[in-house]
Amino acid sequence: MLLKYKYKLKPHKSQTVIIANWLELARRQYNYRLAERLNWFEATRTPVNACPLNVSVVPVERIYQNVPEFRIQTRDGRKKDSNGHPITKKGDKHPNIINGYVVWETVQLADLAQTKKLFPGYKSMHSQVLQDVIQRVQTTMDNFTKPDQNGKTSGRPKFKGKHYYNSFSYPQLSNTNIVKNANGRYCVNLPKIGLVPLVFNRPIPIGFKVKTGTLIREADGWYVSFTIEDKSVPLRRGEIQPTKENSKGIDLGLLHYVVTSDGEFIGVPKFFRFYEHRLSKLQGRLAKKHKHSKSWKILKRKIAKLHQLIARQRWDWQFKLAYHLFSNVSVIFVEDLQIASLVRRCKAKLGDNGQFLPNGQSAKSGLNKSLQDAAFGQFVQILEYVGWKLGKKIIKVDPKGTSQHCWECLNRVSKSLSERFAARHERHSCPECGQELDRDYNSPTPLAPLPGGDGGG
């Protein structure tokens, strides 16, 4: 089992300078290596049987410029065969170009030695931290060029500005890196940085081993995130047959955040809305300041901390709610909402003369803000994680028509979305069986399993 434990760091001033300098060097290296990969990608996407007008034809010599054809291994490999002999040995030649494609990760890792000669500042960085930057570039390009299991790829990689590259990693740490200093304070021993004090608010579970450590910059300081693993703990996956007794359905909304099929109504917390006026005042003051001045930076930091507070409050509340919902059931049915579609802008309306007509986007902007504040997508992810951790599970169902059918007789009772806002039409009333109840309470009930053990739709 793999878990992540995060701790607040309390570095000294000299250590803070070193960490910030390493982060900036890592960001520059990331952008440079990404530029190499993107230039190669652009140069090699020209068709061989056509002459396109929007892509320049690059000579072959330039495509393979500064890319050595082979690399010579400088030491024996760590992987060994059944007899204990290294699989690869010192002096072996390995190709850097295979079927016309450059093995970029290997080439860029080998080029780090030349980088340290040209830019001596990189000599102060730990070698594995620098190597992890190359692996991040490789992962980014793989996500861009290789489709996932659903056949989708990520967008074109972007270069990272100073505010968008906020972490670097030590790929190899262990439990021995968490020690006490001479004063008895818990510290993390980071190679080439030293003993950095941390708030050790919870111990590493017995049997788990620290694998990696990532230093993260946030609005209120530095954090370290440990990846811990215990191979003896199996991955608990909820293979549970849903029944009427061990399951419940939930409906997510803005009138009530969660309405469960057993009649529980949970209100919307509105964390962002609560601090919206305060944020507006701070941002108004920020707009009047001279950019990058001392007062501008102070206000910028205050705004960042306020956004961080809102996000943390929402995160904490959603975790507590997820544990509460799983307290008395093993399976939860939830609507598979498409959040991107919910917050999409209204389509433009054109008049006969070509002028734009009102399309309701002003009202939709306020609705979108409330949807983003509710963070339904994040809550469903938290619900999945909590279910996995507890050995339980959630089942996503198609949200189409869940509020249109009666929970008792499954008769379709059509309702328009606008009827929700009229006080007299917030209730579900079925002409067939006579059931009358709250519209949101009616919605999750068909999500609950049917008596035969099969999930309802």
Image: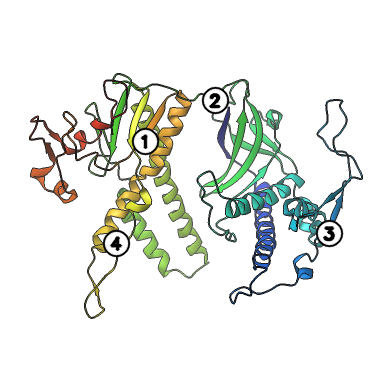
First along the sequence among labels 1 and 2: 2
* 231 up-or-down from 70: above or below: above
> Percent from the top left, x then y, of residue 323?
38, 28
Q: Does the CB distance between marks 1 and 3 fall below 8 Å?
A: no
> Percent from the top left, x then y, of residue 271?
33, 45
Horizontally, is 446 left or right of 309 in the view?
A: left
> Percent from the top left, x then y, of residue 410?
18, 32
Where is mark 4, residue-wise?
346
- Give the spatial CA distance, label 1 vs label 2: 21 Å
Q: Name the quarter where the C terminus is drawn.
A: top left
- Give the spatial CA distance, label 1 vs label 3: 51 Å
Local secondary structure at mark 2: loop
Horizontally, is 18 left or right of 199 in the view?
A: right
Horizontally, is 346 left or right of 110 in the view?
A: left
Q: Name the quarter where the N terminus is drawn.
A: top right
Indicate which disc residue 235 carries. Answer: 2
First along the sequence among labels 3 and 4: 3
- Give the spatial CA distance, label 2 vs label 4: 43 Å
Q: Does the CB distance between marks 4 and 1 fall below 8 Å?
A: no
> Percent from the top left, x then y, of residue 141?
62, 54
- Dot in front, 3 or 2: 3
Local secondary structure at mark 1: strand
The amino acid marked with disc number 4 is Cys
First along the sequence among labels 1 and 3: 3
The amino acid marked with disc number 2 is Leu
Where is mark 1, residue-wise?
396
Where is mark 3, residue-wise?
68
- Give the spatial CA distance, label 3 vs label 4: 53 Å
